[in-house]
Amino acid sequence: MESTSRPGQRFLPTRWTVILAAGRQSSAQAQEALSILCRTYWQPIYAYVRHKGHSPPDAEDLTQEFFSRLLQKHYLAGLQREGGRFRSFLLAAVNGFLANEWDKARAQKRGGGQKMLSIDRDTAESRYHLEPAHELTPERIYERQWAQALLDQVLKRLGEEYRQAGKTALFEKLSASLSQPRGAVPYAQIAREMDSTEAAIKMAVQRLRARYRELLRAEIAETVASPAEVEDEIRFLFSTFLP
């Protein structure tokens, strides 16, 4: 599915716009789009539930139950056709779930319900504890974890592209440059290790960064309703990492 646009081009359907367009007549395509987004962005929900005071086992159960109900019931019926971002929708949905139904979910026998997602609690807990939880609200932790999940997804997609092109070793050498300032990459050292030239490595880094930016825009476009929201969402998500 095409997921981004350039100036002058039509904003092609993305997962979130497909979901919004479904409205009260939820389609199989919309449910599949919702399922993909939920699998990608479950970690922020887990972190949010944890920071609401739930233990790791309860947070895992509540996250599973929330997504189970989200994917199996007609949650799409309450969506408006215009506006909105998937990030905001998901937070509002989980708040409603926790306020009205969490006690029912907690009362269920642990492990007895259908597991809609593959949740690695150890990984989820490790990421949760990286946050300065005593300084942040649950909402802020959710936003930061959302931004991190998005960046992880972009890096995963980029790595897969390099793997398919037979350039895994090059990706592993250069991927650190994505989080480093320009000029900090040891081009000469990498060139020696890759039996290449410094000029070739510089060009490879430029291409890597350009493709990363493209995939970042594409991933964000999957979660917003219009091209005007892409730039705003980029600025917002990166602002979550600021003190």
Image (cartoon, rainbow, N blue to C red):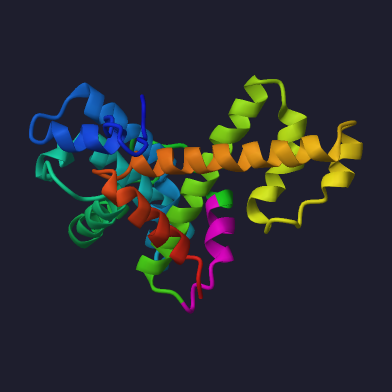
Give x and y (percent) for residue 111: 40, 41
Residue at figure coordinates x 41%, y 60% from the top left: 235
Give x and y (percent) for residue 173: 77, 40
Residue at the extreme left: 24
Q: Nearer the viewer, residue 153 or 31?
A: 153
Give x and y (percent) for residue 227: 29, 44
Residue at figure coordinates x 89%, y 45% from the top left: 189
Residue at figure coordinates x 30%, y 27% from the top left: 32
In which quadrant is the N terminus drawn? Answer: top left
Q: Nearer the viewer, residue 154 or 177?
A: 177
Horizontal placement of 198 versus 174: left or right? right
Magenta range is 124-135
Q: Nearer the viewer, residue 130 or 2?
A: 2
Is residue 120 in view from this perspective? no
Q: Is residue 127 magenta?
A: yes
79 shown above or below 72 = below
**Residue 26: which quarter of the image?**
top left
Give x and y (percent) for residue 3: 36, 32
Q: Nearer the viewer, residue 156 or 209?
A: 209
